Amino acid sequence: MAQSTTCKYSTSGCKKNGMIKCDGCSDRYCKEHYLLHRQQLDKIFDRICSDRDLLYQHLFSPPPSTRVNDSSFIDIDRWEEATIAQVRTTADNARKRVDELMQKSRSQLQRDYEQLSQELQHRKENDDYFESDLDKLTTELERLKLSITNSTRLIKISSQTIEWSTVLVVEVIGRETSSIASTQKVSEKHIEKSKHETATLFDETSLLNEEHQSKVNEFYGKNNQRWKLIYRASRDGFSAPDFHGRCDDQGTTVTVIRSENGYLFGGYTPVSWKSDGEYKEDASSFLFTLTNPHTIPPTKYHIHPQKSRYAVFHYADCGPTFGEGFDLCVDRKSNENSSSYSNFPWSYVDTTGKGVNTFTGDMYFRISDIEVFRLVL
């Protein structure tokens, strides 16, 4: 009984009885040491209040440097810089393309002008013109005037709408009880993961989203068909030998092309690509458009029944080539020039009425990437 009334500090030499019990720790103290015990508790409590005050300053009076040093803002700043740089690059490329097209148009107009001038000079020197000739020359002159006036109007700039609300996403991670709405997230890894998860039908594709993969398989006739990437021009090279080295003798293939202005199109053939300089016959080959400047929905273009012997052309100096004429021809170094072209429809049937302008808005075009997939058996 005497032990229970001993002061807590008896081990430190206190001889007094512990007459006062602490309701918190249940230890007993003499009057002097109870006051000391309370002073220790007061110090701990004051430290907690002091730490709380520091939190107040952090939460309600953040220093200017907080935003600069916060990793989330750094991620946003980096994304902003990279996006602006990409936008500027895209705009610069578009300006260069417009310059090329205008120069091409100007060169053609100059040739037409010279041809008309030579004919006028010849007829004048030989006094060789009658009423019908004057009518013809007047018509040609008016046509040339109109072409000069409309030369800049023939260039159309099309852009795809960007859903900015979903481009940059911010969300809270690691706190299930957070009241902050998880509406946006800065995460390139998340985007890449999503792209990878959708690329299940067409192995490793960087051109086809999930909807386009399903659509191409719909054209093929088997919704769950798998395809293996065997050639990517941006990775393997844009030369004709680069294409044939990876795609010849691979069996059934799908070719997907992205033009410089972002349009997606291509062709399918069960005939193995070769380099023998011959046309190959097949009645099941087809061309397709996925995106185009005319808002035509994804469309499949069958080969004309009487032109099936011209399904594809195997030319060692060109990339994938479809149809006689050619309906679709990928020229060598197609990323460096606008020599690739579509003389569509020649062997394939045009069901949307845009002719040579179907795939990119122009007969001739530059290519930014090509992917070729072989059938997975």
Image (tube, rainbow, N blue to C red):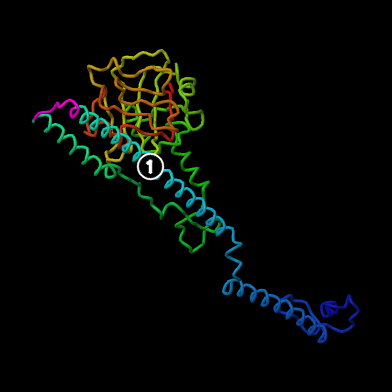
Q: Which of 306 and 333 is in front in this view?
A: 333
In which image quadrant can residue 144 be found?
A: top left
- The amino acid sitting under disc 1 is Asp
Location of the C terminus by quadrant is top left
Name above or below for residue 168 compared with residue 206.
below
Q: Residue 125: x and y, percent?
A: 20, 27
The reply to whether the magenta stretch includes residue 126 is yes
Determine the residue positioned at 34% across, 14% down: 280
Residue found farthest to the bottom = 31
Does the magenta portion include 79? no
Q: Nearer the viewer, residue 326 or 5?
A: 326
> What's the residue at 34%, 32% (across, down)?
364
Please give left or right for residue 103 compared with residue 242 in the image: left
- Whether residue 183 sits left or right of residue 283 in the image: it is right
Q: Is the magenta stretch mostly helix, strand or loop?
A: loop
The image quadrant that residue 132 belongs to is top left
The x, y position of residue 215, in whole percent, is 33, 34
The front one of 348 and 36 is 348
Quadrant where the N terminus sits is: bottom right
Q: Residue at x 31, y 33 (%)?
A: 289
Residue numbers of the magenta segment: 123-130
Q: In which quarter of the image is residue 326?
A: top left
**Residue placed under numbered mark 1 in the picture:** 99
